[in-house]
Each structure stands twice: as structure tokens, then as C-alpha cells.
Image: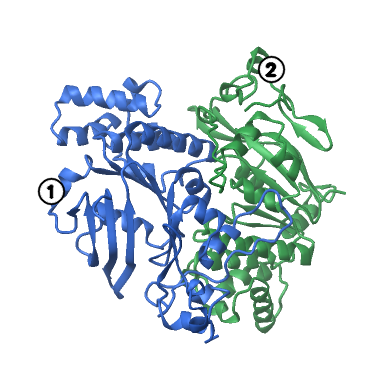
Chain colours: A blue, B green
């Protein structure tokens, strides 16, 4: 168990809100090995970003509660670390790039300043930091980097800003990079460029990447393994080929059926009926049951366990229960 | 006869004026675009942000004042007051952001009923209520929704309210400006399927603007591709998607991440879209084009007929770029 770079066991994160305690993720378990790209896919509000922010301990401290579970980084428990220890971990061990490159960059500091900040924090001299920042900008494919160092974020395009964020995240050579919807705000041709860049950098630095996205195409193109999340829980996980070639969970199937097939234009898309449940009124049994076309009586009552399909490919759905009569009898 | 016929539409915005109020910096958002929409068909318009696709739709509708060009509705110029009235009634629009396009202080009934009141269609309040209920049925919302406010709905439901409002006047054509971009994948399908059902039932025409190429291809009979304010390719949907002629269309389609892990592509269009304030000379795509030569740098390619109802604005149209 401890040979994973990052492993999360049964992590539940809740938030204090005006309407009461809200559970954003429920017993999420996942692991990341050194050097691999892992995808987390799901629709808005399913808890994918919360999980990543929880690992980095970037959730608001006054409202977020780690209600159960553990996060272990290289065998060390992260939840119990204090802010100082966490600061040493962030940047050098794990780093993050965010969805919106405009709000993630500080508008009143130059690009150079922002890249050098992390380097200086991890004990580097000013000259060294500037040299390093320059080479980082070159590495992420920014033209005339000397000029860019002294520019402000608003002077750059969206794609360039995302490249700067990547340069910042890479500055201390992290072993794990969280990419939280890194291309959602970008146009397709820029998206392709940024994804290509991420792929090259990942191979070059042998770092692990956790790619969070709602875009199944991006996940298919980039990842080795995938976690599919729905309403705060992991419903299915496996190698990317398992998930895309023979999805087991009705939600994953529904997501894939929502994508138009260019070869069969006239086929009506099936998709998924209904909408994601309100986090305050979560169904008692399976969280997907109100939208599921295969729902059985047991689904409404009991949370389905994760059933293994092939090695490493599991899905939490009663349809996959080996003692089929037990569940299906109660139709 | 075409339902809507747009000829050589140009829209310029004045960015800066000198001290006498004369234009000094002019941004050409839409440059000489011609497009025809027939009744009952869907025309898709794709392109990256800032390429002028939304501006085109808004200018055709008269939400922006056009700089030059003509718009014909059922063969008549919409400048003509009589035609203008019918045009504004028969051509409606749904917007990208279902959060910003509905007034938060109005109930759903007020929102959907507004066009009905404006055109004096329902004389009595009970008649109006009935018509709104009917429209809510059409877009699969419950009748109770009428008394609620936009913030009580999810993004998908709000988009349904927007569609019901557009349907209120029984239009011939709806301009859909990125109607699904702000929605989750599973909800996108619900909206797309509903748009297709309404099209069949009412013989609606759509101008469907989106940056999701796969979805545009799924919906559209014909597709137009825009780049930096110019229409660079136009043709049958399948042909444009599977056998693109313009190098930009080819790059755009190649850049879409395919949801198939067995088919990983590593193609990239380098560079970024240039500023529309200072477009490159010659073909506007030449700085990024792998096929660019001397001619492309100096001579502007016109949108020319490539046979089989296809058009492309490229000196090298039809050559494999990637």
C-alpha cells in the first residue's frame, strides 16, 4: 500500500455553510504512482477539485472539515501536517495549475516576480531564480522570455498565461502536478498546444500528473488511469482503455453516450435524464439511482460496494453484483 | 427561396477616436461574410473565441448596427420597415449564459410572457397564463415553474426557459449562440435533443454557433468556419468535418481531443490567433499555416466555389496540410 506516491483512503470532506454541514466528497479512495498520469473526470460539483485541493490543503481552513479518511504522501500522513511543513511540501513535492489563468495570476506582479517567488521561498538566490525563471519560460514555449519576465498578466493571452502557470508549477520540480481543468478556458487549438506541452514535460521530468477535467476527450488523450466521480463519490475506476471500451457503471456509460459520434451523425444521443442531486439532499442508497435507467429497489436503499471487473477496474453498482438473484430478485 | 440571406456583411467597431471624434483605430469583427439559411435547416458556425461568430449573429439580428452589407428575409431587405417587423418577430435568439440572459427580478411567467405582451398576442391574463404553460410543456418544465424566479433553477433548466421565450412568438428561425457551452455534458445532450425535436415539430431553422466541433457536426446540415472575422470555409456538414478543405479547418478538427484512448494524436497548430486590430496582410491565416507561401503573404484569397456546394477561402484549398 505504501509504495504509492500518493494514496487517499476513504476521504470525506465537508464544509460548514449557512444551511448546515455539506458533504462535498464521500469516502473517496484513490492512488497515484510516481510518473503516471491519472485522470479524474466528472461533471460540475462532483468533488473532483475539492479532492485535489484537499491533498494540497488549499481548502478554506475555517469552513472545510476533513471528516474522515487519510491522505498519505510517500508514506507520510498529510492531514496532520501543520502549515509550515505543508509549505515545504507544496511546490517541491506537489504543485497545482488552475482552470482560469487570469484569476490564478496576481495582476499587480510581473510574470517574473511570480515565478521567482516559489524559487526564492525554497532558498534560491535572486540571480539564480531569475536565470531559472528564464529557462522555465523557454521550456514552456514562450517566445521572447526576457521581455515576458517583466510583463504583467494582462499583457498576455490566455494560452500564454496558462503556460506561465505551468512554468510556476514546474519551477521547483514537483513530483506530482495537479492540473485542475487546465484547458477548459482555452480554445481548441490552444488546448491542444497546452496538452502537448504537459505531455512533453511530464515525460521529461518523470512527474506524476493528476488531470482533472470534465472533458472525456482530454482524459482519453492524456491519462493512463481514470477515476469517474459523481456527486462526491468515485463510481468507477480503471485503466483508460477499460473505462472507454467497456464502461461498467451506468453513469460512465451515460457520459460516453452523451458524446456525438462523428461516424453516425443521425443517431440520437441518449445521454442521461434528470440532473445531479442537491448535495444537501443526497439519495440514501446509490447516488446515481434517481437518474439511472436500470435502477432497482436495492439501489434506493443500500450504497453499492465497488465490484472488481478486471484487475484495477472497479465500479460501484448493484448491477455488477455476482449474486445477481439477491439484488435483482427485489425488482 | 432562402429564409435568411446575408450578403457581404461587415461589422466594424470603433475602438479609439481622435479629438474630433473621427475613428482612429477600427476593429473589423466581421469581414465580408455571406451566408444563407434555408427554412428547416441547421447551419453551424464554428471558430475560436474572438473570430466574430457571435458578432455575426448579433449584427444579422440588428442587435449591432451593421457597417455594410445586406440582410434579406424571405427575399426582402430587412431595412424595409414592414420586413423588419416580421424579421424581428420570426427570428429569435438564445444565448450562451443562462445565468445572465434571464432577468433575476422577473418570474419565469413574466420572462416567457414578455414577447407575447410586446406583440399583443395574448389579450387576457388567463390566456397568457395558458400560453406560458403550453410553452413550459414544450420545453419539459413543470407548470409550477411559471411562478418561480431564475435563481431557483439549474443551468439546464434556465436554458430551457430561454428556449421557451424564444419559441413564444412561433419563430421560423432561432439563432443559438453557444447554447450548451455553459452546461454539463449530460445536460448538453438533453438540450440538443430538445432542439432537434422542436426543429422537427415546427420546421425551425437554426443558426447554431458553438466551438464544440463534434456537437456542431452532429446538429448541422451545413457548417461555416470562421477565422479572424472571415468565413474561411462553408459546405455540407459531413464533408467539412470529414474532408475539410481549408488548412485552418483541418487544424481545428485535428485539435479536438478525441474520446478514444486508442487514437492519440500529437498534431498541433502552432502560434496564436493574431489581434484583429492588426490582421496580417494577405491571407489572415498565413502566419500559422503550414502551407503558406509567397502568394499567401500578399494576396487575399477569396471564398471560391470548390464544387459540390462547398466553398473555401484558400489558395491551396484541398491540399493536405497536416
Number of residues whose C-alpha sits closer than 10 Å to that of mark 1, classed few (under 14), some (14–19) or many (20 or more):
few
Separation of disc 1 and disc 2 at Cα? Answer: 62 Å
Residue drawn at point x = 57 percent, y = 45 percent? B258
Whether residue B209 appears in this view of the structure is no
To which chain does the residue with label 2 belong? B
Residue at 28 percent across and 40 percent down: it is A106
Residue A118, quarter of the rendered image: top left
> Foreground: A104 or A224?
A224
Judge by depth and name the residue closer to the eye, B261 or A148.
Answer: B261
Q: Mark 2 — residue?
A: B299
Query: Nearer the observer, disc 1 or disc 2?
Result: 1
Residue at x 74%, y 27% (from the top left corner) = B318
Image location of residue B267, percent across then percent down: 55, 32
Indicate the quadrant containing the C terminus of chain B: top left, top right, bottom left or bottom right.
top right
Could you say whether the residue bearing mark 2 is in a helix, strand or loop?
loop
Q: Specify the subunit that label 1 lies on.
A: A
Q: Secondary structure at mark 1?
A: helix
Question: Percent x, y for residue B168?
Answer: 69, 68
Locate residue B144 relative to residue B218 in the image: left or right.
left
Residue pointed to by mark 1: A85
Q: Position of residue A280 (x, y in %)?
A: 37, 75
**Mark 2 burial class by Cα count in 10 Å: few <14, some 14-19, many 20+:** few
Amino acid at each position: 500500500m505504501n509504495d504509492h506516491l500518493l494514496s487517499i483512503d476513504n476521504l470525506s470532506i465537508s464544509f460548514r455553510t449557512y444551511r448546515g454541514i455539506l458533504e462535498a466528497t464521500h469516502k473517496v479512495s484513490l492512488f497515484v504512482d510516481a510518473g503516471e498520469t491519472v485522470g479524474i473526470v466528472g461533471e460540475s460539483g462532483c468533488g473532483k477539485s475539492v479532492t485535489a485541493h484537499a491533498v494540497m490543503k488549499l481548502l478554506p481552513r475555517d469552513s472545510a472539515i476533513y471528516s474522515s479518511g487519510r491522505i498519505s504522501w510517500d508514506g507520510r500522513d498529510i492531514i496532520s501536517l501543520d502549515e509550515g511543513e505543508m509549505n515545504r511540501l507544496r511546490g517541491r513535492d506537489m504543485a497545482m495549475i488552475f482552470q482560469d489563468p487570469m484569476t490564478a495570476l496576481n495582476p499587480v506582479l510581473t510574470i517574473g516576480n511570480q515565478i521567482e517567488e516559489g524559487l526564492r521561498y525554497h532558498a534560491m538566490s535572486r540571480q539564480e531564480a531569475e536565470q531559472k525563471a528564464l529557462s522555465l519560460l523557454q521550456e514552456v514555449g514562450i517566445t521572447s522570455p526576457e521581455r515576458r519576465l517583466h510583463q504583467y498578466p494582462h499583457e498576455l493571452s490566455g494560452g500564454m498565461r496558462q503556460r506561465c502557470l505551468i512554468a510556476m508549477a514546474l519551477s521547483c520540480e514537483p513530483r506530482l502536478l495537479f492540473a485542475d481543468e487546465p484547458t477548459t478556458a482555452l480554445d481548441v487549438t490552444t488546448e491542444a498546444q497546452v496538452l502537448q506541452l504537459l505531455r512533453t514535460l511530464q515525460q521529461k521530468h518523470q512527474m506524476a500528473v493528476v488531470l482533472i477535467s470534465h472533458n472525456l476527450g482530454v482524459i482519453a488523450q492524456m491519462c493512463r488511469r481514470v477515476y469517474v466521480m459523481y456527486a462526491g463519490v468515485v463510481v468507477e475506476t480503471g485503466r483508460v482503455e477499460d473505462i472507454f471500451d467497456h464502461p461498467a457503471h451506468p453513469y460512465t456509460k451515460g457520459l460516453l453516450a452523451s458524446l456525438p459520434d462523428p461516424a453516425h451523425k443521425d443517431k440520437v444521443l441518449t445521454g442521461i435524464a434528470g440532473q445531479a442531486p442537491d448535495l444537501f439532499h443526497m439519495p440514501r442508497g446509490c447516488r446515481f439511482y434517481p437518474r439511472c435507467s436500470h435502477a432497482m429497489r436495492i439501489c434506493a436503499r443500500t450504497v453499492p460496494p465497488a465490484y472488481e471487473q478486471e484487475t484495477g477496474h472497479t465500479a460501484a453498482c448493484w448491477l455488477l453484483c455476482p449474486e445477481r438473484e439477491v439484488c435483482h430478485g427485489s425488482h | 427561396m432562402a429564409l435568411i440571406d446575408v450578403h457581404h456583411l461587415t461589422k466594424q467597431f470603433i475602438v479609439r477616436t481622435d479629438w474630433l471624434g473621427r475613428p482612429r483605430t477600427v476593429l473589423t469583427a466581421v469581414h465580408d461574410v455571406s451566408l444563407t439559411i434555408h427554412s428547416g435547416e441547421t447551419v453551424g458556425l464554428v471558430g475560436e473565441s474572438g473570430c466574430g461568430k457571435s458578432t455575426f449573429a448579433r449584427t444579422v439580428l440588428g442587435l449591432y448596427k451593421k457597417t455594410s452589407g445586406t440582410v434579406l428575409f424571405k427575399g426582402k431587405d430587412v431595412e424595409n420597415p414592414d420586413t423588419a417587423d416580421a424579421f424581428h418577430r420570426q427570428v429569435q435568439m438564445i444565448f450562451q449564459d443562462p445565468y445572465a440572459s434571464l432577468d433575476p427580478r422577473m418570474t419565469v411567467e413574466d420572462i416567457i410572457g414578455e414577447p407575447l405582451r410586446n406583440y399583443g398576442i395574448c389579450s387576457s391574463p388567463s390566456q397568457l397564463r395558458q400560453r406560458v404553460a403550453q410553452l413550459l410543456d414544450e420545453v419539459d418544465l413543470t407548470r409550477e415553474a411559471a411562478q418561480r424566479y431564475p435563481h431557483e433553477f439549474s443551468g439546464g433548466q434556465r436554458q430551457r426557459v430561454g428556449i421557451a421565450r424564444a419559441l413564444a412568438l412561433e419563430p421560423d428561425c432561432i439563432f443559438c449562440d453557444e447554447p450548451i457551452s455553459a452546461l454539463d455534458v449530460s445536460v448538453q445532450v438533453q438540450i440538443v435533443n430538445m432542439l432537434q425535436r422542436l426543429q422537427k415539430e415546427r420546421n425551425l431553422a437554426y443558426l447554431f454557433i458553438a466551438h464544440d466541433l463534434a456537437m456542431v457536426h452532429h446538429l448541422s446540415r451545413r457548417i461555416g468556419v470562421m477565422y479572424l472575422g472571415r468565413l474561411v470555409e462553408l459546405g455540407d456538414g459531413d464533408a467539412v468535418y470529414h474532408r475539410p478543405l481549408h488548412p485552418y479547418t483541418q487544424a481545428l478538427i485535428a485539435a479536438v481531443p478525441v474520446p478514444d484512448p486508442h487514437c492519440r494524436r500529437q498534431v498541433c497548430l502552432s502560434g496564436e490567433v493574431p489581434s484583429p486590430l492588426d490582421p496580417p496582410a494577405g491571407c489572415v491565416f498565413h502566419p500559422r499555416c503550414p502551407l503558406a507561401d509567397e502568394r499567401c503573404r500578399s494576396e487575399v484569397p477569396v471564398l471560391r466555389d470548390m464544387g459540390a456546394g462547398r466553398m473555401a477561402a484558400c489558395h491551396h484549398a484541398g491540399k493536405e496540410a497536416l
